[in-house]
Amino acid sequence: MRLKSRLRKLRSEGKFVAPLTLLAQANYQRVNLRDYFNRRKLDNSLSAIAPDTAPDRQVDFAMEAADRFLRPMQNRSELVRLMERVRAMQPRRILEIGTARGGTLFLFCRNAAPDATIVSLDLPYAINGGGYPEWKAPIYRSFAQSEQQLILLRRDSHLAASRDEVLRQAGSEPFDLIMIDADHRYEGVKRDFELYAPLVAPGGIIVMHDVLPNRYDAEIQVDRFWEEVKARYATEEIVEDPAQGNMGIGIVSNYHAAQPLEEPA
């Protein structure tokens, strides 16, 4: 078992929680310091990846550019297939819950409609490696195409007040695509689904990440909730290898055709 997996397993078991949390925060700061020194390298290369660049090339850029500045915590082939789907949809309203390093946010901006409204909702220092420092916000804003509106909200997605702020800033029109990729614990992902899934437009999709059982990190429990979602809604999965032990993308395409799981408080 990899060292990081061992440490996460210990934390999930309630062992050495304080020192392991400090260690995780130190690693977070180390990565962001590296990114800070690579920020100009990223700025200088963004313009080379246009909206009409092939999705596989866009994903490769997000994975590797500027010493992995944007690197999404995703399986490459799964992410390429998702972005091919997004490009075909041309969504005009996107809500991303969980932005972290900004890789999927960059890809959404490149593949959404040229006049899309895109909202990022992200909690600084979040569990499961999320969050981004304030100095990255101007870089993220530069992802938007000239006619797109990109809204960055640094708030706790579990609060109803955060949902209300999304609607206040982006308007009450439903979203064509909602990406849920924030708190990966069972209760966390369930709360995000209950709060934000009702905001999807009829015919829109809800995308969830890490739907496969995770053999490396006991704190990633999305698969448990995904089983409940599959029992109620029409779903599909984008998975490179069912035995890969982590990752996997799930898509809900008929949210409004089924009874919601329960009403959020």
Image (cartoon, helix red, strand yellow):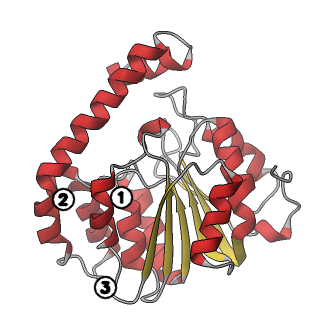
Question: Which residue lies under the disc numbered 2?
Answer: 65
Question: Which residue lies under the disc numbered 3?
Answer: 52
Disc nearest the viewer among 1 and 2: 1
Q: Amino acid at mark 1?
A: Gly
Q: Secondary structure at mark 1?
A: loop
The percent coordinates of residue 123 (x first, y second) are: 49, 48
Task: Answer few, some or many: residues within 10 Å of disc 3's Cα (few below 14, many 20 plus, some between 14 and 19).
Answer: few
Q: Is residue 200 left or right of residue 95?
A: right
Q: Amino acid at mark 2?
A: Ala
Q: Quadrant of residue 94?
A: bottom right
Q: Is residue 85 left or right of residue 7?
A: right
Q: CA distance from mark 1 to mark 3?
A: 20 Å
Task: Answer few, some or many: residues within 10 Å of disc 1's Cα (few below 14, many 20 plus, some between 14 and 19).
Answer: many
The percent coordinates of residue 176 (x first, y second) are: 62, 77
Between residues 99 and 209, which one lies in front from this camera angle? 99
Question: What number is the disc on residue 102?
Answer: 1
Mark before the other along the chain sequence, 1 or 3: 3
Q: Secondary structure at mark 3?
A: loop
List the single residue furthest toward the top. Answer: 15
Q: Amino acid at mark 3?
A: Asp
Q: Secondary structure at mark 2?
A: helix
Residue at (43, 74) in percent of width and height: 150
Q: CA distance from mark 2 to mark 3?
A: 18 Å
Between residues 211 and 99, which one lies in front from this camera angle? 99
